[in-house]
Image (cartoon, rainbow, N blue to C red):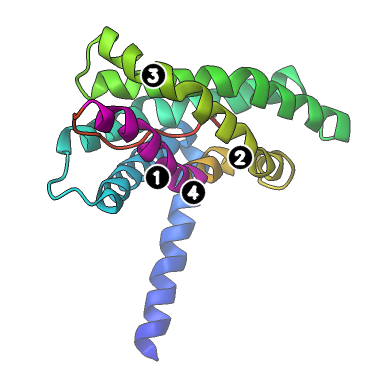
Amino acid sequence: MSLSKSAKRVAFRSLESYFMQLYTHPLRTKSITSAIIYVLGNYTSQRISGGKALDKNSIFAFGAYGLLFGGSIPHYFFECLEWLIPGTSHLAVVKQLLFQRLIFTPLYQLFTLYTISRLEGRTHRQAIHQLIPIYVPVLVANWKWLTALSIINLTVVPPVLRVVFMNLVGFVWSVYIATKRRKPSDRRGGSGRGGSRPGV
C-alpha cells in the first residue's frame, strides 16, 4: 500500500514538474517531448512490422525530426493561429479548423514525409520517389481520421497542451504511416523504414 502511495506521489510530482517546464520553457519542453514520442512511435512501428533487426538510423532520424521540427513547427503554428483568427466563438473555431486542415496540414504532412526521408539518408530524388505514391492517401486518411481530434484539440484542450495532445495522437498515427511508407519499399524489394508523423 505504501509503495502504491509512493508511486502516486512520484507520478504527481513528475507531472507537476512537466507542466512547470511546459509553462516556463514551452518550446524546449514540446521539442523534447516530441522527440521522445517520435522515437517511441518509430520503435513501436518497427516491432509491429516484425523486423528482426531495428533500423537505428530511422529511429535517430525520427528523434532528430521530433527535436528540430515536431515540437517547434506546431508550437509556432498554434501561436500564429490564435493571432490570425482570435476568439473562441463557433465561427472562429470553424475558421481555425479549416485553416489548419486545408492549409497547414497538407504542407506539414508534405514537409514531414520528405524531411524524415532525408534524415534517414535518402537523396532528394529518393525522398521524392518515396513521397509521390503515399502523399495523397496519407493526407486523405489524415483528414478522415484526425479531423475530429483536431476539433477536440481546438475546443477542449488548453493552448499550452495542444502540441502535446497531437503528438500523443501521432504516436498511434505513426503505425499507420509506417505501413504506408513501407509498402513502396517492399514492392521494390527494399527494406522499409519506420513511419512518419501526422500533420496536426
- Regarding residue 27, the answer to whether it shows in the image is yes
Quadrant of the image for the N terminus?
bottom left
Mark 1 falls on what kind of element?
Answer: helix
Look at discs 2 and 4 and give the one toward the viewer: 2
- Quadrant of residue 95 within the rendered picture: top right
Three-letter amino acid code at disc 4? Met
Q: Which residue is mark 3?
A: 131
Give the magenta-colored segment's residue range: 169-188
> Are dots 4 and 1 in contact, CB under 8 Å?
no
* Residue at the far bottom in the pictured view: 1
Camera-nearest residue between 50 and 110: 50
Question: Which residue position is annotated with label 4?
Answer: 20
Helix or strand or loop: what does disc 2 sit on? helix
Magenta part, dominant SS: helix
Tell me the kind of residue under disc 1: Val
32 on left or right of 77: left
Q: Position of residue 109 (x, y in %)?
A: 49, 24
Vertical position of residue 197 compared to residue 161: above or below: above
User: How many C-alpha atoms fall within 10 Å of the one at disc 4: few (<14), some, or many (≥20)?
Assistant: few
| 4 or 1: tag closer to the N-terminus | 4
Quarter residue 192 falls in: top left
Report the residue marked by disc 2: 146
Which quadrant of the structure image shows residue 81? top right
Callout 2: 10 Å neighbours few (<14), some, many (20+)? many
